[in-house]
Image: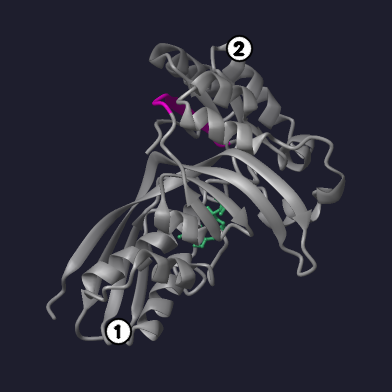
Amino acid sequence: MTNQSITLKAYGKINLGLDVLRRLENGYHEVKMIMQSVSLHDVITITALDTSNDIIIRTSSGKIPCNEQNLAYKAAKLMMETYSIQNGVDIYIEKNIPVAAGMAGGSTDCAAVFKGMNSLFEIGASEMDLRNLGVKLGADVPYCIMGHTALSEGIGEILTPLPKPPACIVLLAKPDIDVSTKYVYENLQADTLEIHPDIDGMICAIEKQDLHTLCTKMDNVLETVTGKKYPIISEIEHLMKSEGALQSIMSGSGPTVFGIFTDTEKAGKAAALIRERNLTQEVHVAEFI
Ligand code: ATP
C-alpha cells in the first residue's frame, strides 16, 4: 500500500441536559444525558504507513500529549490489534475543540480514528462493532462514533438517536481554568441531589421542535460542583442571558459554558463582551450538527 490517507471532521459535543441518577458500586455513575454535536471540530488526517507499523501522533496543539497517552493513539492501537492491521499510521490532529473542557475533545478524536481506520483499511466493521470497541477507551466514545443528537444512558454506552433540535446559534465560551472530570464526579452528591433535569420533557420538546421549551428545561447537575467552585461559570451564563440567550448552562463536567441564541447579532455582541471583560478569550460561534 502506498501512503493512502483519509481526513475526517471530529465534532465536539455539548450536553443539552445532564442528569446523574446514582453512583454505582464500581465508582461509575448512571447518567441520563442529551448529547448534541456542534460544528466546532478537530480535523483528523490518518495516513497509512507501508514501511513501518508505528503509530505517529502529531498535533497543532501544545496542550495534548503526542504519545501513547493520546486517545487517538489508543484508538489506533486497538484497531490494529483487533483487526490485525499490518500497516502503521501517522495521525495529525488539528485541534480546535477546547481541551479538558467538557466537550469530549479527546473522545471525538478517538472516534474519528476508529471510523477513519475502518474506511482506510476497508475493514467493514459496523457502527455497533466500533461502538463496542470504543467504550473500552471512554464512556463518551460510543456517542462520538454515532454523533448528532442522542439520549445517553447507563454509563454513557446506551444510546438512542433523537431528532435534531431546531436550528439556533450556539455560543461556546471556555474559561481559562482546568477542571478534572474525576474531581467533579467524586465531589457530586449524586444520591442527595434536590433537582433533577426533566430529560423526558426535553425529549418531548425536541420531538415537537419547540426550542423555547427545550431551552427552559436545559440543566446540568454537574454545575452543583463545578459552578460552586468557579464563579466565572455563572458570570458567563448571566452575561449570555442578559445579552439575549434563551438559555445558558455548562457542558459536561465543564468548564465550557454554552448559550443558545436565535439572533446572530446578539450572539456576536455577547461574544465580544465576554472577550472585552476578559472572562475568557476562548469563544466560538457554532451550530448543531
Ligand atoms: P469529556 O467531555 O469527555 O469529559 P473533556 O472535553 O473534558 O472530555 P478532553 O478534551 O477530552 O476533555 O481532555 C481530557 C484529557 O485527555 C486532557 O487532559 C488531555 O491531555 C487528554 N487527551 C488525550 N488525548 C487527547 C486528544 N486527542 N484530545 C484532547 N485531549 C486528549
Quarter of the figure that contains the C terminus: top left
Residue at horizontal 47%, vertical 32%?
207
* Image colouring: one colour
Residue 119 appears left or right of 148? left
Residue 107 percent location from the top left of the image = 49, 58
Q: How far separated are the C-alphas under marks 1 and 2?
A: 54 Å
For residue 234: magenta? Answer: no
**Outermost residue toward the left?**
2
Q: Identity of the amino acid at label 1?
A: Ile
Which residue is tagged 2?
Answer: 242
Residue 195 percent location from the top left of the image = 79, 35
Which residue is tagged 1?
Answer: 85
Q: Is residue 119 above or below residue 17?
A: below
Residue 224 percent location from the top left of the image = 77, 38
Q: Quadrant of residue 122?
A: bottom left
Q: Give the crowd class for mark 2: few <14, some 14-19, many >=20 residues within 10 Å.
A: few
The magenta region covers 166-174
Residue at horizontal 75%, vertical 37%?
196
Q: Earlier in the sequence, mark 1 or mark 2?
A: 1
- SS state under label 2: helix
